[in-house]
Image: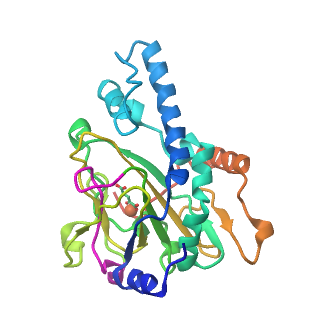
Amino acid sequence: MHLTEAQISSFHEDGYLRLENVLGTDDLQPVIDEYSDIIDKRAQKLYAEGKVSSLHEDEPFTRRLLLLAKEVPEVAGNLDIMQERGEATFNFLKNPKILDVAESLCGSEIVCNPIQHIRAVLPHRATGGSPTHFHQDIGVCWPDTDSYFMLTVWVPVVDATLENGCLAVLPGSHKYGLRQHAYTPGLNVPEEERPPIKSKPLPVPAGGLILFHNYTLHHALPNESDEVRWSFDLRYHDAYMPSGRPFYPTFLMRSKFRPDALQTDYKTWCDRWEFALMAGKDAVRYRWKR
Ligand SMILES: O=C(O)CCC(=O)C(=O)O
Ligand SMILES: [Fe+2]
């Protein structure tokens, strides 16, 4: 779906837009199946090594990783898009429904940005970890992107609820410019740096999307449920713009003017990521002083 004029205005006014029923099971299930296999392989290995007491084979996608992680927390590590490099996940990055939405805000020359994640957010109580702090996505980019627009597409892979730690935004905060981020220990915009705007939680069922601007302040609620909150956060922008992480690869996913230059081949994507993760291992990511 392309956005309507009213939706585009609302996005520019509020710095975010919540959409429902954009994706269907056909879009999300291949990714769920791919990650279910990844978790199954990890479980089989840990079980064979005697490190977990059960395979938890009959548990649903929202539970199995949690039960394994209770015994071996590392099982939930290194699951990210560029680390696992699954083909269904790659296909998801160029999902035409997502690119249609992105086109409405980024124009016809759409690059998939390397700052992209799949997150398996475990219940807060299970890990003691803190939910994503207040930040702006511009705050995790190099300063060469400051004068450009980048779109974040946040995708719940399972329903994102108030209980399992949905995203929350400060509506209109994109109009306040770059805020100072600090390490606490994750990057955080401290309260005194935040504009006086009340944070708005954005529960959204699977199939929906939350779009937001690179200057919009946002954070996540704690996951107080007994399930894993699986979500993607993907970023798209115009092809002429720098990515904010020059040591990582970008991919032209849709182009009206240079269709010959599309970078939509799975094998090339894998190879470029594999190289970049090695070559960019020690690169400076953040502009903020520790
Ligand atoms: O999913 C989260 O917890 C954080 C997501 C986020 O910060 C983003 O999408 O930019
Ligand atoms: Fe973010």
- Give coordinates of residue 233: x percent, y percent: 45, 58
Please determine whether, in this image, residue 93 is positioned above or below residue 71.
below
In the image, what residue occupies the spot 38% across and 16% down?
51
Name the quadrant where ligand 2 sits: bottom left
User: Closest to the observer: 41 or 77?
Assistant: 41
Please determine whether, in this image, residue 216 is positioned above or below residue 116.
below
Q: Point out the stretch of residues depicted in magenta.
A: 159-177
Q: Any magenta on residue 25? A: no
In the image, what residue occupies the spot 27% across and 73% down?
170
How does the figure colour the protein chain or chains?
Answer: rainbow
Q: In this view, does 161 lie to the left or right of 27?
A: left
The residue sitting at the right extreme is 260
In the image, what residue occupies the spot 29% across and 77% down?
171
- Give coordinates of residue 104: x percent, y percent: 55, 78
- Give coordinates of residue 130: x percent, y percent: 25, 48
Image quadrant where residue 92 sits: bottom right
Judged by its main secondary structure, the magenta piece is loop
User: Closest to the observer: 85 or 230?
Assistant: 230
Please determine whether, in this image, residue 243 is positioned above or below residue 43.
below
In the image, what residue occupies the spot 46% across and 49% down?
118
User: Closest to the observer: 286 or 16?
Assistant: 16
Q: Is residue 75 left or right of residue 34?
A: left
Q: Any magenta on residue 169? A: yes
- Give coordinates of residue 161: x percent, y percent: 28, 55
Placement of the C terminus among the 4 image quadrants: bottom left
